[in-house]
Image (tube, rainbow, N blue to C red):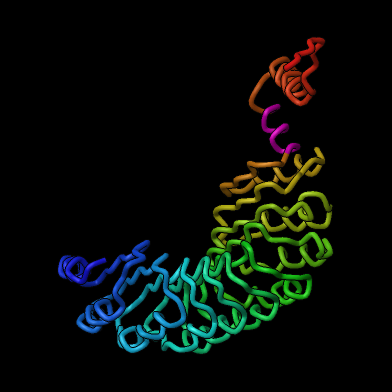
Amino acid sequence: MKFSEIARQLDKHPTTLRLGGSSSIDISELNQNLMAHTTTLTYLDLDGCQLNNGSLEQLATSLAQLEKLETLNLSANKFTDIGLSKITLPKSCRTLILEGTPIGDAGIDFISTQLPNLEVLWVRKCKLTDASIDAILQFRKLKKLWFVLDNSFTERGIKLLAKKIKELPLETLSLRCLDVTKTSPEVVAEFLDNLPSSIKELYISSSSVIGQNECCVNALIRLIRKPSSLQFLEMRTLLIRDENFAQRIMKALKESDLSADFTGRNPAILDLRQKQLCSPVEHERSQQEERLREQPLKTDCVFEL
């Protein structure tokens, strides 16, 4: 992106600079523009700008002086913990987006010391392990956390979350693709029981441990029924096949004010919903059609090439 284009954007909107996807940024020219707007810029989007450790370090001086910056998007770049450690993040920053960057546990630890008042953190598709959870729990003002997809957490990490997560003022928590296949159902249930009452939106997907174990289903139902701020619950692809589980979950949802999304591979819930929405004859017909679709195609014809 040419200098004149960056300058034109800032002249029009001096509080916002969106350079997402611009792979040909001249770092020195960007620095000049940032230095000219240190007291006005509140939103900086550098998503997918091919920033590596070296180019990020070149931005260190100007980034540190953005005294009004509230949102910094550095997602889908190439820098690592080493590059991140070379900059000073502005204390005013409340939202940090690092999705798709190869940062690891050391990077999260660095951010927790730089931005203790952070409110929104996106670290999906990074290189985090259990060691990062201690640092994440240091963000005492954190309201929104998106952090599981493609990160590697074990039962130890889930246990630590279960014990400490209720201390955070979280309003939105995304645990999409949370891999708890090697975590005991009891630990997963404890985690669900200990979610903070401030949660408004919860996203948990692709976790058959929850959908196929009674203690987890019981914890899920307690979560639905518990007086809290919860308004939206996404539990896709939990592989809920037990009709009794499905009936109990749906009953709890019906008695609550929650909006819920159980689409995906939750056959018992989808089957139960279909029964509720159509007559017995229509339901049986749809079931027969579904069974036919699942049968392998049979033919007596032989085709020769």
The reply, left or right, for residue 279 in relation to residue 242 is: left
Q: Is residue 45 above or below residue 273?
A: below
Highlighted range, magenta = 267-275
Residue 84 colored magenta? no
Is residue 26 something one can see in this rendering? yes
Residue under the point 33% across and 78% down: 69
Provide the major secondary structure of the magenta segment: helix
The reply, left or right, for residue 108 in relation to residue 90 is: right
Q: Where is residue 169 shown, x and y percent of the image?
A: 55, 73
Q: Is residue 167 above or below residue 280?
A: below
Query: Residue 289 is drawn in which quadrant?
Result: top right
Nearer the observer, 126 or 242:
126
Is residue 139 something one can see in this rendering? no
Q: Is residue 205 above or below residue 254?
A: below
Query: Residue 130 is drawn in which quadrant?
Result: bottom right
Question: Where, quadrant-wise, is the C terminus in this rendering?
Answer: top right
Residue under the point 63% across and 41% down: 263
Nearer the observer, 112 or 79:
79
Query: Residue 94 is drawn in which quadrant?
Result: bottom left
Nearer the observer, 263 or 147:
147
